[in-house]
Image (cartoon, rainbow, N blue to C red):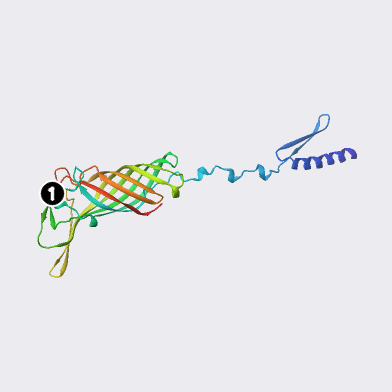
């Protein structure tokens, strides 16, 4: 009996040592006689057999949802004819703009991306607000009737500020291409459309009268199209983005003013992403 106990003890010790040196085995079996065996369960997991975080494919850590829409855009506005130029008909020359003072501010607040090919191709949408100023180059006053809008040349006073400003809610639908799975390395190109809803319009004039500055503001629809659709393209590298929009809908309602279309070009100056 003592011999059996000593034998079992020796075998157990040997099994424990042997099992520790054999990390890939979960159990070890030792027969010690007819119908009798000892089973040793190895609960130790070697470090080499444990899950190594570094072995996980880090491709899943890449941002599959990055886009280049949200941010603050600054641009310049133009009004072009259906022939894509700024040579207007004689009766419409009053609409000539001063581009240096016709600015577009666009605050793109929300973006959402639907991946098509991981980080490389996706559909982008979101929500933005734009404020577009159109400063007239000639010394004119706008006349707005139910039938049309037109400008009348003024000799007096001399306007220091003479512009119409319109603000819009805008929703983009863009197909975007990126050359890299990392945003800081990506060349990007996006093209699509911008749907717009005009939410405010004001006509503002400022001039000097007998040494006093006079400011006039008139809020009206000014026969401008309430809904807009623009083609747009955005191209850049990393967070530097150049953009352009071209109006697919006329600036004024049909037959309510000159047939001109808004065009804007600019730069994203404060990206949010």
Name the residue at 32% across, 49% down. Answer: 128
Image-quadrant location for residue 140: bottom left
Name the residue at 24% across, 57% down. Answer: 100
Give x and y (percent) for residue 194. Answer: 29, 44
**Mark 1 Cα shell of 10 Å, populated few (<14), some (14-19), many (≥20):** some
- 212 versus 271 height, above or below: below
Quadrant of the image for the N terminus? top right
Left or right, 38 with respect to 227, comes to: right
Extreme top residue here? 34
Extreme bottom residue here? 211
Name the residue at 75% across, 43% down. Answer: 20
Left or right, 113 with respect to 207, comes to: right
Image-quadrant location for residue 34: top right
Give x and y (percent) for residue 93. Answer: 13, 51
Give x and y (percent) for residue 253. Answer: 17, 44
Q: Which residue in the protein does label 1 denote?
A: 92
Give x and y (percent) for residue 257. Answer: 14, 47
């Amino acid at each position: 009996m003592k011999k059996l106990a000593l034998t079992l003890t020796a075998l157990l010790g040997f099994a424990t040592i042997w099992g520790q040196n054999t990390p890939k085995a979960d159990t070890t079996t030792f027969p010690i006689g007819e119908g009798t065996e000892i089973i040793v369960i190895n609960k130790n997991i070697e470090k080499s057999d444990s899950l190594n975080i570094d072995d996980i494919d880090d491709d899943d850590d890449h941002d599959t949802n990055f886009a280049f829409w949200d941010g603050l855009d600054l641009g310049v506005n133009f009004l072009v004819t259906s022939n894509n130029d700024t040579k207007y008909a004689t009766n419409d020359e009053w609409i000539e703009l001063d581009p240096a003072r016709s600015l577009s501010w666009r605050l793109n607040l929300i973006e959402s991306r639907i991946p098509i090919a991981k980080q490389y191709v996706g559909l982008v949408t979101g929500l933005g607000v734009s404020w577009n100023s159109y400063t007239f180059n000639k010394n004119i006053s706008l006349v707005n009737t139910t039938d049309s809008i037109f400008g009348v040349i003024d000799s007096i006073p001399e306007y220091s500020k003479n512009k119409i400003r319109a603000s819009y809610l805008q929703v983009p639908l863009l197909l975007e291409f990126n050359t890299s799975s990392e945003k800081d390395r990506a060349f990007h190109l996006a093209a699509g459309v911008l749907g717009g809803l005009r939410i405010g319009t004001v006509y503002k004039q400022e001039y000097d009268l007998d040494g006093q500055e006079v400011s006039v503001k008139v809020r009206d629809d000014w026969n401008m199209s309430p809904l807009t659709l623009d083609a747009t393209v955005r191209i850049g590298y990393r967070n530097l983005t150049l953009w352009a929009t071209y109006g697919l809908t006329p600036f004024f309602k049909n037959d309510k003013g000159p047939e001109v279309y808004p065009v804007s070009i600019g730069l994203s100056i404060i990206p949010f992403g």
